[in-house]
Amino acid sequence: MATARDGKLEIRPLTARHVDDVKTVMRGTWGSSCWDLFPRYTAAQQRELGITFGAPGTAEAKRREVLAKLARRRKNSAGLVAYRGAEPIGFVSLGPRHDFSVVEKSRATPPVDDVAVWVIPCITVRRGHRGEGVAVAMIRAAVDYAGKRSAPAVEAYVRAGRKRVHDDFAFFGTKAMFAKAGFRVVRGVLPGLRKGSVPRVTMRREIRKRAAPAGRPGVAAARRSGQAPTAGNARPPRSPGRGGSGPAQRTAARGASPARAR
C-alpha cells in the first residue's frame, strides 16, 4: 500500500520482503552496516541480539533478520522506503519513541514532555538522488503514517548549527529540511553534554485529528432523548391528532381548539 505519491516518487512502509532495499539505499555509506538498528538498541541489547561486529557475514545476516522481523509487525513497520519506479532511493526510520532505546537513554535527547511522540531518528537519501526534495517528501509521508496510527506528534533531533558535514553523518536530518515539512523547534541545544556529543535541536510537528463527520439533523437529539433516529427514507411516525381515525384521535380532534393562523 502506498503511503504517499509525489510525482514519480512513491513512498511506502518497509516490508520484510523488501528489507534489502534499505541496504541498497545506504550502500557506500556508514549506514550500510546499521540496518536501522543502532538507534533502537543499546550496546548491551545489541550484544544480546548478536548484531554487534563479529565474524564476517555473521552479524550482518543477523541484522537483516532483526530488521525483517521489525518490518513484519502489524501495528507499524520499521520505517518508510521511497521509490522511483522499482528503484529504492530513500529510507526514513520511524516509530514510537519507546521503540528506540538509544534515543530514550541519550542525554542529548531526553523527553520534552509527557506527549507520546513518534520519532524520526534518521533519514537517508541515496547518492545521485539528493537535492531533489526526496527527504522532505519522506518526512511528510512519515507524519501521515504516524497520524493514521494515532500518534499525537512526531519529533526529530536534528544536528544544530549550519556547519556542513559529510553526508554520511547527516542522517539526523537538518533544521531546514524538517522546517519545510512543517516542524518547529520546541527545544534548543541542551547544556552540559559530554565532549564529543552531537549538539541537537528538538523539532516537532503536532498532528491534528480530523473531526468526526456531522450526523443528519435530528439524529443527535433523538439519541439524547432515547428515541430511535428516523432512517433517511422512512416516514416519520404519525403524531396523535394527525391523520388518525381511531376513537382517541376523534375525541382529541373534537376537544381541540382550532389552531390560530400565523
Image (tube, rainbow, N blue to C red):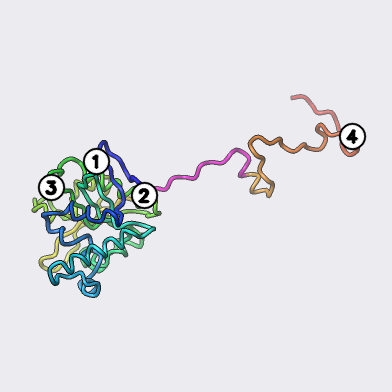
Report the Cα–Cα distance between label 2 and label 3.
Answer: 31 Å
Closer mark to the observer between disc 3 and disc 1:
1
Magenta stretch in the rendered image: 208-220
Rendered image quadrant of residue 231: top right
Percent x, y of residue 109: 23, 63
Does 219 appear in magenta?
yes
Q: Main SS type for the magenta part? A: loop
Percent x, y of residue 196: 10, 66
Number of on-image labels: 4
Report the Cα–Cα distance between label 1 and label 4.
Answer: 77 Å
- Whether residue 180 is visible, yes or no, is no
Residue at image x 20%, y 41%?
133
Q: Is residue 217 above or below residue 14?
A: above
Task: Work out whether mark 1 precedes mark 4 in sequence or the reverse, and give the earlier one.
Answer: 1
Are the residues tagged 2 and 3 within 8 Å (C-beta)?
A: no
Observer-nearest of 126 and 116: 126
Observer-nearest of 204 and 41: 41
Report the Cα–Cα distance between label 3 and label 4.
Answer: 88 Å
Specify whether 164 is left or right of 261.
left
Closer mark to the observer between disc 3 and disc 4:
3
Q: Is residue 80 above or below residue 43?
A: above
Residue type of the residue flagged with mark 1: Gly
Read off the residue under disc 1: 85
| Mark linked to residue 179 | none
Task: Work out whether mark 3 precedes mark 1 in sequence or the reverse, and give the earlier one.
Answer: 1
Closer mark to the observer between disc 1 and disc 4:
1
Read off the residue under disc 4: 250
